[in-house]
Image (cartoon, rainbow, N blue to C red):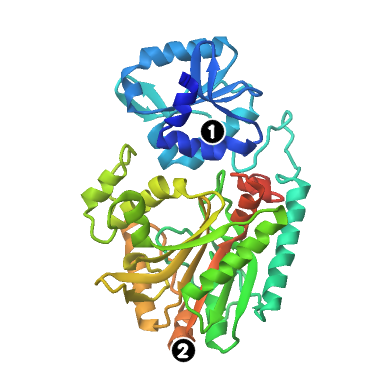
Amino acid sequence: MDNARQMRAETTEAEQRLWLHLRNQQLGFKFRRQHRIAGYIADFVCVERKLVVEADGGQHLRQTDYDHERTKVLQAAGYRVLRFWNHEILGNTDAVMDAIWHALHNASVQPTHGLTTRGKGHRSPSPRPSPPQAGERVQRGDALDWQPSATFDAIRLRARLNALIRGFFAERGVFEVETPVFSRGGNSEPNIASFSLEFSGRTDGAPRTRWLRTSPEYPLKRLLAAGFGDCYELGRVFRDGEAGGRHNPEFTMLEWYRVGWDHLRLIGETAELVNASLALVGRAAALRVTTYRDLYRDALGIDPFAASEGELRDALGDVGIDPAGLGRDDWLDLLMTHRLQPAFARDELLAVTDWPASQCALARVRDDGDGHPVAERFELYLGTVELANGYHELADAGEQRARFVRDLERRRERGAAEPPLDDAFLAALDAGLPDCAGVALGVDRLLMAMLGTGRIADVLAFDFARS
């Protein structure tokens, strides 16, 4: 076996993660991995754009002279070189991909470093050029690029998908509804930032500050409590601070509710919808269902409910993470995003059920039979992409208010905004929410998976940079 082939067979986790996002021309250009140039084997190479991308582990701290000479040779051969630390690729993938996209689309940029500046035994923030927002193209002179960020074919595929979704639910007697885009109450979830605005007209004593929805969940549940029955909404939602290769501050969410169902039954319908969508592009995906606990035990050999925080940290291996301020759920999330999710099979729909009770959000909690409280919720992945999040919905207004208050306490500790609670939603729960299950599905993510792209701009007519 030659060196290049052997290196492809022995890739690191960071190289595997990077290849997932570079392969199949996801950034618009073809990359080769373990490609020979001037006597060296470069990790990833785009020959067309003369760009080399290197993924470096900690051993490179001890070989800076070698790396410097290697870079000089590659540059003499006409290539520009981007280098990233493994922990940057695993812990900040979006920023890494944005930097690579920026280098691909700006031939005059001469990158030598990734997200950090190198020195012997020292790392500090790099003053690298700011990467473009999602979908930004090279501008001609000072002219603003006014054209769409998505191709016409992608825009038409969205129209076909929207029609399919509406037909899917019409056949099942689930009614489409429209609910307010902004409201008096905001989302208390500590990891989601909401936009707010000030209303200048007459309010009759009501607050002028309104919050753009991050999900239609609260008003949809108010309809359920009023007795409307099965319903769905397909529309835009908004989240502040989420812009980059895979994120846009406004995006399309599909959310629906089934009265008398639990989350396990809803998994099947969600998978049916995803497969009907994939059929539009000639694809299909087999469904596999597993519990959160079994997923961690089978893939990592640890029990996520019983392992200590130290054992969870150790399971991350060589992933470099600053532990300051991180708790148990943070370490579990890091294991999901850095160790488990990158290995999910491309053409498999994986539904993960029975999450830790500490991650219950708006779901019910029950005992798993082994003395562990678990949230009756699921997350659905298509390959490495998280598509949907579903709950067996909590109907206890007192418990839901207590969860909201805990969320606000965490936001206060972080110095984040504390939006007012949605009292109308809590009143609806108090009046009586029927037993039901609901799920939210990211339509843009589904389109990205259908088109095989890692950039949300490729499925938006006009992304954030052009809006």
Query: Disc 2 on helix, strand or loop?
Result: helix
In the picture provided, is 219 more to the left or to the right than 308?
Answer: right
Would you call the spot at circle 2 few (<14 residues within 10 Å), some (14-19), or many (20 or more)?
some
Q: Is 181 left or right of 389, judged from the image as shown?
A: right
Type of the residue with mark 1: Ala
Task: Tell me if 446 is positioned left or right of 363 in this view.
Answer: right
Q: Is residue 240 visible?
A: yes
Q: Position of residue 82 (x, y in %)?
A: 50, 25
Task: Say few, some or many: other residues with alpha carbon within 10 Å of mark 1 (under 14 / 14 to 19 / 20 or more).
Answer: many
Residue nearest the observer in this picture, 366 or 330: 366
Residue marked by disc 2: 432
Q: What is the x, y in percent for residue 385?
A: 53, 52
Q: Earlier in the sequence, mark 1 or mark 2?
A: 1
Residue 77 position (above or below residue 215): above
Q: For this rendering, which residue is in front, 211 or 388?
A: 388
Name the residue nearer the viewer: 388 or 140: 388
Q: Nearer the viewer, residue 286 or 255?
A: 286
**Residue 406 location, quadrant:** bottom left
Q: Find disc 1 in the rendering and name its residue.
A: 99
Residue at 53% across / 55% down in the picture?
Answer: 348
Hey, which quadrant is residue 46 in on the image? top right
Left or right of 59? Residue 420 is: right
